[in-house]
Image: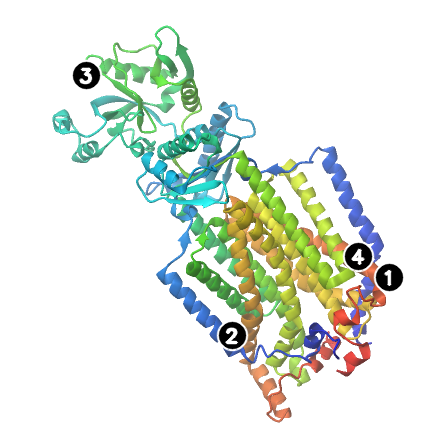
Amino acid sequence: MSYANNQRNSGEVKKARPARTLTVTLLITAIFYGVAIVIGATSINLGLDLRGGTSVTLQPRLEAGQEGQVTPESIDQAVAIIRQRVNSLGVVEAEVTAEGTGTNRQIVISVPGETGRRIVDLVGQTAELRFRQVLVEAGAVPTSEDDSLLQGSALTSDQIAAFKALDCSKPESLAGRNGDDANSPLVTCDREGGARYVLAPAQVIGSDIKGATAAIDQQSASGWFVSLDFTGDGTKKFGTLTQNVVNLPAPQNQVAIVLDGVVVSAPRINEAILGGSAQITGSFSQLEAQDLANVLKYGSLPLAFDRGEVQQVSPTLGNDQLVGGLLAGGLGLLLVVLYSLFYYKALGSVVIGSLALAAAHVFLLLFLLGEWVGFTLTLAGIAGTIVAIGVTADSFIVYFERIRDEMREGKPFRVAAETGWQRARRTIIVADLVSVISAVVLYIVSVGSVRGFAFTLGLTTVIDLIIIFFFTKPMVSLLAKSKYFQSGAKWSGLSPRSVGLVTAVEGKVA
Amino acid sequence: MKYSGLGGRLYRGETSLNIIEARRKWYALSAVFIIISMFSLGIQGLKLGIEFKGGSSFIVTTTSGTVEEARQTVAEAGYQGNTIVQTIGNDKIRIQTGVLETAQSNAIQDALAAKFGVTVESIDTQNVGPSWGEEISKKALQGLLAFLICIMIYLALTFEPKMAIAAIVAVIHDVFITIGIYALVGFEVTPSTVIGFLTILGYSLYDTVVVFDKVRENTRAITSTGKATYAEATNLAVNQTIIRSLNTSLIALLPVAAILFVGAGLLGAGTLKDLALSLFIGLIAGTYSSIFIAAPILAALREREPAIKAHNQRVLARKGGAAPAVAANPVARKKKRRK
């Protein structure tokens, strides 16, 4: 026969013992499952979109000319500080990670459960704390008296305009404004939205603080407050500041405590404070006081951040999505199985076996990766595996159709299973590599849910390659030895009718 | 012969679809689609989700609440901008607003919780900043370009450079068609749509690779056989792989259809639906383009090569200038002797 010159390749095939390959494949799978069970990796880490929780993605905020400030070091530092803040809330399983590269780095904070709002408020604060002398204090809304208030103040016309335009009754005026310049005056609101201020340049800043604790004053009923300890340098600076303002007329005898550009409180200074400690009062709740103390204690972030995306998923929706994802996966698998049986009849059982083993491998890797690298499965990740069912099934079709092609040329199944494989192998490798390349590219250039999708898609494509080489092919070789398939029985999927040839002789005549 | 199935007849060339010969028809068909796509893109543009343009979305689970109540509640909570309110499934209402500050978002959450008698934590909320969309759009575009370049290099190395070109043209074709359908129908574009879309590009190439692999096999020694022109040999390859192509596409569509069914039917909206919809549209476009665009373009490109030109003339001369529908069977047998 003219395919004899393929024997150079199929020489190895002849030596190959399909039964042994199959046994080894199944044995290795079983061993890994054993390992997974022994190290306790028997559950999959579910993403927040599948079990509920809050995730916040922070983007570094860049003013013009600041691009150079986003360095891996500054991002790592920010991650460390945010992690401490989140941990200070006592939330277990909170995760803070950096994603992306270069100036596109983002920080992603994921917190399971229902602590949403506090996390969102807390993590994005740059916590730039400043002590500024109050120059002008006025009501929340601009009035006609503004002009007389501003008279005699050394403000620029821009600042005057900003003050007149500021309406502290609007929520957006109270959003933390990061990056206020410590060396110039500041026009801002208090955090309750009840007053407008013009403040002098900062004389004491966050790094002058040594420690902060939340405390409650039972006697004076002033509620929760935060007490601060200054560093040696800070003590001196704060002493000078208070000494300078103590004898000035109101409101200039007040020192505003400004956090992220918003006035937390602006107490009147009754006497110079030289002892190196101070208190921030401001009708705090216990939580607020503790959060503020933590933020101050753990320092300010090296960069200002915007909340790029905030997602709060309730456990109910999470569960719905998980059930939906699993249902779609099961349904997809069932449809593919039915189609394979319909089209390939008994040969379809190989598809079912391969898909079952592929599924077992996917679960195994999700267990192990979850344990080893903390891999988390998201809804997009589930979708990736479902889509991969199609890719996996495709490689079987490529192989089976090749076998049929070979049979159309008159070869018996036993031979066609091998020669068809020689040709299908290449196509499958090339096509799967295209899939892997796209998954890798997607993974590298993307963030968030896209990554989860790319990861599982790439993973399952690699599994597909392993399965088809070490399970599907040996399986077909085994079947090729059976009388049932060799005879081309009606339901074998290889009958002359299925293959599309009446007899080998007629096929050749045509 | 009545038993020999379509697959067998196509394989042996007994039944032949003149796909390559009729290429001008496919080009024209695709050109019409692409022109319609570009027009609808130019006029209507894409309907971008809040992830791209910034904004907030709140999903409240309630069986008694109405869309109108939700709209009113948001307005009373102090948000004056445009809101899109819609019901999802049986028991959910989704409210989409423009970009909100955290304080505003909290106020709306509180108001909705009070109005519909649910806890704040049970409201599914998403807040997207204005510059976030820019960021992910940029990433998606980078991804697309990086992907095309990588694949082009890879295909040029594994196949022939001209196959890489034809495959990329087919992929770009799919990109235009899919975007056009989104613009035309007004489906919402979310990051999940983009994921699906990028996956499709990979899949479309996968499909093209399967066809081209056969083309290469059939045309490897073409100039030494003299029995078929390049176009005829390519046409046979397309015919031989068409059943396989339809099969693989159908089987890839099945799980996608399952995701679409669950995503759109049971969950109502979100990741699964958006992903599956773009996969569904793209898969169909990808299958079409592998057969009807990529292969004809490859034939056209190759036929301009002097060697192939001369070969085609020899073949046609031998056949007395009559262009046969197909002279393919000999080629199919020839390949046994290759290598």
Q: CA distance from mark 1 to mark 3?
A: 101 Å
Residue at disc 1, secondary structure: loop
Residue at disc 2, secondary structure: helix
Q: Chain of mark 2?
A: B
Q: Which mark is residue A232?
A: none
Residue lying farthest to the bottom in this orientation: B320
Residue A375, located in which quarter of the rendered image? Answer: top right
Q: Position of residue A47 (x, y in %)?
A: 56, 38
On the same chain, marks 1 and 2? The answer is no
Amino acid type of the residue that numbered disc 1 sits on in the rendered structure:
Ser
Task: Give the left or right position of residue A298, taking residue A262 as reference.
Answer: right
- The residue identified by callout 3 is A250
- The residue identified by callout 4 is A475
Q: Nearer the viewer, residue B172 or B35?
A: B35
Numbered disc in front, either 1 or 3 = 1
Sort mark 1 into few (<14), some (14-19) or many (20+) by Cα contacts within 10 Å: few
Residue pictured at 72% horizontal, 61% vertical: A342
Q: Chain of mark 1?
A: A
- The residue identified by callout 1 is A482
Task: Give the left or right position of residue A134, taking residue A478 as reference.
Answer: left
